[in-house]
Each structure stands twice: as structure tokens, then as C-alpha cells.
């Protein structure tokens, strides 16, 4: 009795565990969908000129999402370590996607921005080289799109996508395509940043350094310095603030405007010997946001194309014929022929299907007819052995 109770409790525990796992997986999928929306809105807010309060909330939401997925990755990695399947988790179960879409994002993207918003210490984000840093951050943030690969299972109910083989192949080719795009973008960004390839960011940095050097040379002559500031006010609209020995000597906008208009990363901080200069980076940030939105749309369209176009094609040309032939081999009363499209008749699968239709099915029909004839003959022979009285009774 005790053993039976223990068995029942064990079975109930497994059922509850599976139910909890299903609920957790549904929660993860819901969060992934929210992340995709947040990633798009974060860049769209820049392009649309949304106020800083909304943009700051979107940045904080990104931080909490990245924190959630970092914790989830560490839990999955710990469980895999305890079960001795770390290699399988990181490769076959695509744990590398979980890693790329969690820890690097938290450390290099959302973490610093969230720290800036929560502490108000935003100067660090504007230090020299911020333009290259912004490019790298944008490239790293694109890794969030990799999470889209984990919700391929949502599309299982779509026609012709129920085959496990089709799902696996579509998931693999989608993961390869999206990962190659993301890694190429990240590699090119890092390569261009490390080798100082000429681009818009380099031109802007050179211009800002030239302005800083020009003002630094005028500090010995107060009148010339004031005149230089007046000239820059009219010619360089990206110059926001100039501080000399810690004192603000020029500011294009009021403190209230800065607080309501400039989010972290919207400006560059360039310190010189006695000068500190702040530059408006919103046009460049808008360009990066435009590129990110375009890349985001491209990746989503690629994933949907594989799911909605390639997946049915794979099912029709591979998994469906195999499914029909497998049932014909397993089930004695299943005699459905494989439909062979004319344009695919030279494919290996359909050449095999043609042999199945023309060789195996006729042989199967003859074998079944012979078995039925033998069975009928055996019954007739047995009927002679049964006495008539027993038949009547």
C-alpha cells in the first residue's frame, strides 16, 4: 500500500513538474514577444521624437528583460551542468542563442544605460569614442532578435508545419541565417571601430575634436575665446555646452530642455585640458535607429518567410511523402499513393515514392488478396468438421 502511494505521488509530481514547465515556457514565449515589441519601439521612439520619459521607460524595460533572460540562461546552464549535458544544451538545444541574447546585452547595452538612468551619472556614456561605442551597442542589441528563434514552436499549428523533421530543419536553417546576419553586423561594426575605417562617425568625431582644439587655442585670449564661441553658436548647431575650468561659459539650451529632450547616449562628452564640451548626437543616433529598425524588419521577414513559405515547401517535398510511405509500410489497410508533382519527379524522395507506388503497393494488394483467399479456404475446410447439431444449436 505504501509503495503504491509512493508511485502515485511520484507520478503526480512528474505531472505537476511538466505542467509547471509548460507554464514557464509559455511565460518565456510571452516575454520574448514583449522583447521584440520593446526592441522595435526603442528605435522607433528615437525616429519619432518621443519624449525622454517614454524612451527612458523603454530602456529600463529592456534592462529588466535582459536581466530576466540572463537569469533564465544561468538556470538552464546550471540544470544542464547538474545533468551532465552542458555540451548538448549549448549546441543541440541552442543554448548559445540564450547566451548571446542575455549576458552580453545586460553587460554592454541595457546595464550601463539603466545604471545611468537610475543614478543620474550619464557623463560616462558620452566619453571619447562614444560614436564607435554606440555602433557596437546597436550591433549587440540586435542579438535580441535571436530570441525570435525560440518561438518557432508557435507556428506548429500552421498547415504542413506539424512534422518534427520539418520543424527541426526550419528551425536550423532559420537559426543559421539569422545568426550569420547578426554576427556579420557585429563583426563588421567591431572591425570598422578597431581599424578606424572612415565613415560618418569618424567625420563627426574629427569635427568635434577640431572644435575642441580651436577653442583650446583661444583660451589665452578672453576676447578671442568669446568671439569663437559666438561664431560656433551660429555655425555649429551640434555644440551644446562649453565649460571652462568647471564653469559653464556657453549653453545652447536650458537645463529643463536638456532634461526633457536628451536621453542617455544622445550627446558626446569631450574633455580637454581646461575645457569640457558637450555635443548633440541625436542626428547620428537617429541614423543608427533607422538602420536598426530596417535590420529588425529584415530579420523578422526572413524568419516569417522560412516559417510560412519554406516550411510548407519542405513538408510537401520531403516530410509528407515520407509520412505516406511510412504509414503504408506500418498499416496493412493503408494503400494511399504518394502524389508526385511533375516538377519534382526527379527528386530522390519522389523517385523512391514512384517505386513505392508502382512496386510496393501492388505487391501489398496481391499479398493481402492471397491472405484473404487462404483465410476463406481455411474457414470452409473447418466448417466441414463442425457437426450439424452444434451448428443448429
Image (spheres, helix red, strand yellow):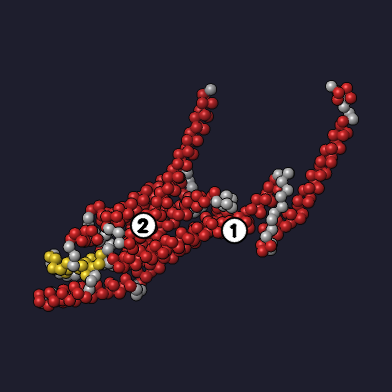
Specify the label residue 313 is tagged with. Answer: 1
How many numbered markers are drawn? Answer: 2
Where residue 269 sits in the image (x, y, percent)?
Answer: 23, 66
Vertical side of 363 occupied by 263: above or below: below
Q: Earlier in the sequence, mark 1 or mark 2?
A: 2
- Relative placement, left or right, of 233 versus 63 is left
Q: Residues within 10 Å of mark 2 (few under 14, many from 20)?
A: some
Residue 303: percent from left, percent from top: 49, 58
Q: Which mark is residue 107?
A: none
Q: In this view of the protein, which residue sits in the foreground, 120 or 316?
A: 316
Task: Please state if 1 lies on the left or on the right of 69 as rendered.
Answer: right
**CA gap, disc 1 and disc 2:** 33 Å
Label 1: few (<14), some (14–19) or many (≥20) C-alpha neighbours in 10 Å: some
Q: Secondary structure at mark 2?
A: helix
Looking at the image, residue 25 lies above or below residue 239: above
- Which residue is pictured at 23% across the width and 71% down the height? 237
The answer to whether residue 81 is visible is: no
Residue beneath label 2, please? 41
Residue 179 at x, y percent in the picture: 46, 60
Identified at 51% across, 26% down, the residue is 5
Amino acid at each position: 500500500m505504501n509503495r503504491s502511494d509512493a508511485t502515485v505521488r511520484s507520478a503526480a509530481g512528474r505531472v505537476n513538474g511538466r505542467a509547471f514547465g509548460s507554464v514557464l515556457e509559455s511565460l518565456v514565449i510571452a516575454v520574448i514577444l514583449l522583447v521584440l515589441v520593446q526592441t522595435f519601439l526603442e528605435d522607433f521612439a528615437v525616429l519619432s521624437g518621443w519624449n525622454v520619459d517614454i524612451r527612458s521607460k523603454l530602456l529600463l524595460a529592456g534592462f529588466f528583460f535582459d536581466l530576466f533572460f540572463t537569469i533564465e540562461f544561468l538556470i538552464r546552464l546550471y540544470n544542464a551542468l547538474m545533468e551532465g549535458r552542458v555540451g548538448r544544451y549549448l549546441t543541440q538545444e541552442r543554448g548559445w542563442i540564450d547566451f548571446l541574447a542575455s549576458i552580453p546585452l545586460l553587460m554592454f547595452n541595457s546595464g550601463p544605460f539603466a545604471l545611468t538612468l537610475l543614478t543620474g551619472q550619464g557623463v560616462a556614456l558620452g566619453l571619447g569614442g562614444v560614436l564607435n561605442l554606440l555602433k557596437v551597442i546597436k550591433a549587440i542589441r540586435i542579438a535580441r532578435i535571436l530570441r525570435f528563434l525560440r518561438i518557432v514552436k508557435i507556428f506548429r499549428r500552421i498547415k504542413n508545419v506539424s512534422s518534427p523533421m520539418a520543424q527541426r530543419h526550419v528551425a536550423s536553417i532559420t537559426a543559421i541565417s539569422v545568426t550569420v546576419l547578426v554576427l556579420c553586423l557585429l563583426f563588421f561594426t567591431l572591425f570598422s571601430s578597431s581599424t578606424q575605417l572612415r565613415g560618418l562617425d569618424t567625420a563627426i568625431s574629427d569635427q568635434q575634436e577640431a572644435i575642441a582644439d580651436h577653442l583650446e587655442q583661444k583660451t589665452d585670449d578672453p576676447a578671442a575665446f568669446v568671439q569663437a564661441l559666438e561664431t560656433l553658436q551660429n555655425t555649429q548647431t551640434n555644440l551644446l555646452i562649453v565649460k571652462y575650468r568647471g564653469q559653464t561659459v556657453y549653453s545652447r539650451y536650458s537645463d529643463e530642455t536638456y532634461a526633457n529632450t536628451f536621453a542617455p547616449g544622445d550627446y558626446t562628452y569631450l574633455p580637454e585640458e581646461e575645457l569640457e564640451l558637450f555635443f548633440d548626437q541625436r542626428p547620428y543616433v537617429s541614423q543608427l535607429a533607422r538602420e536598426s529598425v530596417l535590420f529588425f524588419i529584415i530579420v523578422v521577414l526572413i524568419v516569417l518567410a522560412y516559417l510560412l513559405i519554406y516550411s510548407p515547401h519542405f513538408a510537401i517535398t520531403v516530410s509528407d511523402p515520407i509520412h505516406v510511405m511510412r504509414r503504408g509500410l506500418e498499416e496493412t489497410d493503408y494503400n494511399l499513393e504518394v502524389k508526385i508533382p511533375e516538377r519534382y519527379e526527379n527528386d530522390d524522395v519522389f523517385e523512391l515514392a514512384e517505386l513505392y507506388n508502382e512496386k510496393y503497393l501492388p505487391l501489398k494488394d496481391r499479398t493481402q488478396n492471397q491472405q484473404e483467399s487462404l483465410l476463406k479456404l481455411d474457414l470452409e475446410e473447418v466448417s466441414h468438421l463442425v457437426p450439424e447439431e452444434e451448428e443448429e444449436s
